[in-house]
Amino acid sequence: MGHNKFTVTNDLLATRGQRLSNFIIDLLMQYVIWLSVGVTISIFADIANSSFLKTWIGTIGVLEKGFSFAVIAGFYYYLTELYFSRSIAKFLTQTYVIMKDGSKPNYKSILKRTLCRFIPFEAFSFLSGTAEGWHDSMSETYVVKKHEFEKQKRIIILP
């Protein structure tokens, strides 16, 4: 028996509310990770009695803080979406990142998706007519509602 071809439809796409929740929750998670890394370095500096690390931590500027946060954000999105097709926020809001044919995105698509998040004002791209950001359109990925996606895929892919 032949298989029908799956394609993402508008009814499967995550809502604006889910996308906003994803943004806020992921931002909070990245901040927690960033603070945890800073506290860990600080504790290590105390244990090792490293005056260099203590001085460095005490004199970190705004640019260094911003850069370190961006590095953590990049790794956060890349690793969670590459391995799980979802970040922690997407897990909580029951959404996935997929390709148009319903497949899991490959490392190139996820890398492109992650790098596009660093485009200035990219977060405002959601203010257009759809609940799609530049990081979605440029990487040709979609964020879909988990349960609706799985139900639709079962119906279409059934032998």
Image (spheres, rainbow, N blue to C red):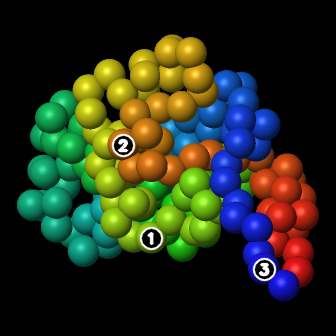
Query: Between tags 1 and 3, which lies in front?
Result: 3
Q: Residue furthest front?
A: 1
For badge 2, the amino acid type reads Met
Residue under pointer 2: 138
* 22 vs 102, nearest the viewer: 102
Relative placement, left or right, of 14 versus 65 is right
Q: Which residue is mark 1?
A: 106
Q: Secondary structure at mark 3?
A: loop
Q: Are marks 3 and 2 in contact (CB under 8 Å)?
A: no
Q: Position of residue 58 (x, y in %)?
A: 19, 43
Name the residue tied to disc 3.
2
Q: How many marks?
A: 3
Residue drawn at (39%, 60%) of the image: 109
Amino acid found under the numbered disc labelled 1:
Asn
Question: How far apart are the two marked residues, 2 and 1, measured between alpha carbons?
Answer: 14 Å
* Precedes in sequence: disc 2 or disc 1: 1
Q: Does 74 sit left or right of 100 as displayed?
A: left
Mark 1 or mark 3: whose residue is earlier in sequence: 3
Q: Residues within 10 Å of mark 1 (few under 14, many from 20)?
A: some
The x and y percentages for residue 105 are 50, 65
Q: Nearer the viewer, residue 98 or 80?
A: 98
37 over 94 or under it: above or below: below
Q: Residues at badges 2 and 1 in contact (C-beta under 8 Å)?
A: no
The residue that appears at 45% across and 55% down in the rendered structure is 77
Q: Residue furthest left?
A: 52
